[in-house]
Amino acid sequence: AQTVTQSQPEMSVQEAETVTLSCTYDTSESNYYLFWYKQPPSRQMILVIRQEAYKQQNATENRFSVNFQKAAKSFSLKISDSQLGDTAMYFCAFTDISNFGNEKLTFGTGTRLTIIP
Amino acid sequence: AAGVIQSPRHLIKEKRETATLKCYPIPRHDTVYWYQQGPGQDPQFLISFYEKMQSDKGSIPDRFSAQQFSDYHSELNMSSLELGDSALYFCASSPGMDSPITDTQYFGPGTRLTVL
């Protein structure tokens, strides 16, 4: 079974600063995807970024980028030029794609990020 | 762009009643997933369907059942409701293997179920 660990329950940062959220995972599989989802106060689950394990290049989406260290099983999210709208709960998630029909998401416990004006 | 649609958005039931939650996936998405998120918790996988067949099952109580219909929409049926079933229920869908973003799940807005 896979596990996802987010060791930072809460973080806060000043607007326009850069913040990094940590995530580690444990799996014996070699084919998998990793995700960061954002859940603002509206409780909607919004996909932030996706990383395929077979790709060495770190994924980026505008102000969001990841540092994927496969050997260390680490997958951190960096938010640059943070904005008030980034205030949300952030979940790291894992999906195993090695076996068809087993692509459910396993989530970490989340990091509550607050952007301070 | 079209998103996942869930109905109803809010539902209030009494203990021991039944509830039906509906999910309409993004067009051309062939897999549907259901998750339950309790207060202050991360989402927990319940069940998934691929091409109208159950593909995986998680911690879903025997009181719950689900299916996917020919138009790909899915329904989660919950019977003998308990206070502990109060939660946010998400449906997510993902595109098929011919998509460059296969196995990427997009979530609906959720159905907030309150059991009194």
Image: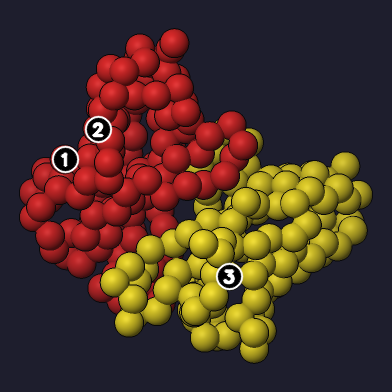
The reply to whether callout 1 and callout 2 are in contact (CB within 8 Å) is: yes
- Colour in which the image shows chain B: yellow
Identified by mark 1, the residue type is Asn
Of residue B89 and residue A63, the one placed in the foreground of this image is A63
Chain that appears red: A
- Real-space Cα separation, disc 3 to disc 2, in angstroms: 30 Å
In the rendered image, the vertical position of residue A17 relative to residue B31, given as above or below: above
Instruction: Identify residue for label 1.
Output: A67
Q: Locate residue A54, reporting x and y percent.
A: 13, 63
Instruction: Identify residue for label 3.
Output: B25
Residue B9 visible in the picture: yes
* Tag nearer the camera, 1 or 3: 3
Q: Are marks 3 and 2 on the same chain?
A: no
- Real-space Cα separation, disc 1 to disc 3, in angstroms: 31 Å
In the rendered image, the vertical position of residue A85 relative to residue A97, given as above or below: above
Q: Nearer the N terminus, badge 1 or badge 2?
A: 1
Instruction: Identify residue for label 2.
Output: A78
